[in-house]
Image (cartoon, grey):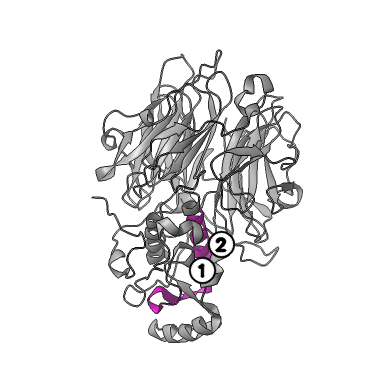
Amino acid sequence: MVLRVDWDGEQDDASRMFGLSHKVSVGVLLVGAAFVGVLAAGAAPSLPRFGSPTTVAQVPWDGYLDEIGVADVTGDGKPDIVGVKFFDGSATETHPLVVLAGDGKGGFKDVTKQVFVGAVPRTQHARHIVFADFNRDGQMDFFIADHGNDNEPFGGWPNTLVLSAPGGKLSDASANLPAEYGFTHAAAAGDVNGDGAPDLYVGNICCGAPPGILLNDGSGHFTQLAGALPSSMIDYRSSGERYTGSALVDVNSDGLPDLVLAGEQDTPDAVMLNDGHGLFGPLPGAMPAKPFSSDAEGLAVTPIELNGDNHEDVLLAFTKQNPFYQGRWIQVLINNGDGTFKDETSTRLPQQDNLDSWPYAIRVADLNGDGNPDLAVAVNNGGAPPFYLNKGDGTFTPLAVTTAFPMFDLADVNGDGRTDIVSSAPSSSGGSDTYAVSLQQGATSVIRPSRTLTPGRLNPAVKQSTIKRTICKTGWIATVRPPLSYTNALKMQQMAQYHETGPPSSYEEDHFIPLELGGAPKDPKNLWPEPQKQSSKSNPVETALRRQVCHGLLTLAAARHQIATFKRANG
């Protein structure tokens, strides 16, 4: 049975809402989220250790595995694996997606045939998986961008939408999308018109329907928004303007998700600003030159915050057109504060010209628990995927990881508060796809908030209907933050109640339901003395969840549910 928690802000007493027996993984939500650096500049980061990959499932071949993603799609609070496939053999053949249900201990089971109400969705050439709560029921759904057979005449293929259903089930809701055959090479989700529901950007690049913005009515039904994109993007056949990577990111800090686009071949990268109604226009001079050469192809765009100024920075992944799809470059772009970017790759992530395996996706997560965003790159066509640790100042150093297959995602799959590696080795025709988990090693000793002393309290002013003028409004959180004179005095009282005997300077009063998600600012039942070494782990999660809420990817209720469960398990 799926546990549903009413966290809409209507109740002031949260004590009855935390009797949770399961855990909700937020590992996947940390991908692309902002983190606050806590190490001194240049300090050596601690090195995470990953165990050998343990096979958790083998799925008989039915199309080449093209991407995997990790999220709780069955609604039991445990991360699951979604795999999508392709095989460009004919213009009509399709392949079933795969769902592996997690047990919360690092194990997974193939439940594809059992979890769907009705037939299992099939794709032709799945390109990307986008997770969001599209039907606003507090559970994660997903969209699959599908460009169809990757051979002439490039006829395109319909995209796939999977929505949660009662009882932990899933349903193929692709009929909720506008009928189209497009070559969808990129996709992104975000609330583009401020109605609280995650909408979609579909990045079609050739031979069918043009790119567009699909507006969500709040129930997971989508309609095309006319005039949402510049005419040069719509008329790509004559303009040649095509974008093969995308993200919806608030680049100018106005609370609205904008489009950051990585260009195909001769198309420069671009930023399209959102007018608040889901209509996008170009920001001139926003993006620096591409790496390699002007015909480099951008394949992924991932938001990240690297310099502590609370403006979204971005990572872009590129490969070469000549030689075709050889070479890998991760470009680090720092936001100037106005939505324009400067290239700081040479100082933050130095690289050399290469013919390495091309990058498929950029994974961002805190690998070593220091509160800083680290990164790793999923690659195609073999080769070891590169991992990088953040040194605490937004610069990166390589991390030797030999326990991941080239296709992977990052998440805490066993509930110990550490990021693990979920990877897969695609098989050739006639074999089986191998899914494996590399658990992060090491002992943990954490102090957790007491259910009695700190049950949690909410700020009645913060509800789903008020987030735009409260938690999502720049500067609002500072207006409700209690003064240090209050929290320092309360800290001394609560340290005694928690039997903590360390130096007070090593603790901070933490809001169990954070101010960023509408927790009560001064109620002692929502505060507890958290060791500062633990706050470096929870602070990034709070920031990530707030951004998910403000971008319309997660309800306020679901975000409160997740942070509560995370803190009960991890402090």
Is the Cβ of the residue at disc 1 closer than 8 Å to that at disc 2?
yes
- The tag on residue 371 is 2
**Chain part drawn in magenta:** 521-547
Identify the residue under disc 1: 535
Q: Residue at x 48, y 25 (%)?
A: 125
- Distance between the alpha carbons at the discs numbered 1 and 2: 8 Å
Residue 51 higher or lower than 17, as above or below = above
Depth check: 571 or 443 in front? 571
Q: Residue 298 in the image: x percent, y percent? A: 65, 34
x then y, percent, for residue 454: 37, 74
SS at mark 1 in the image: helix
- Indicate the quadrant where residue 167 lies: top left
Residue drawn at the location 23% of the way across and 50% of the way down: 1
Residue at (53, 67) in percent of width and height: 477
Q: Is residue 347 above or below residue 324?
A: below
Q: Nearer the viewer, residue 78 or 195?
A: 195
In the rendered image of this protein, does residue 322 appear above or below residue 137? above
Residue 122 located left or right of residue 355: left
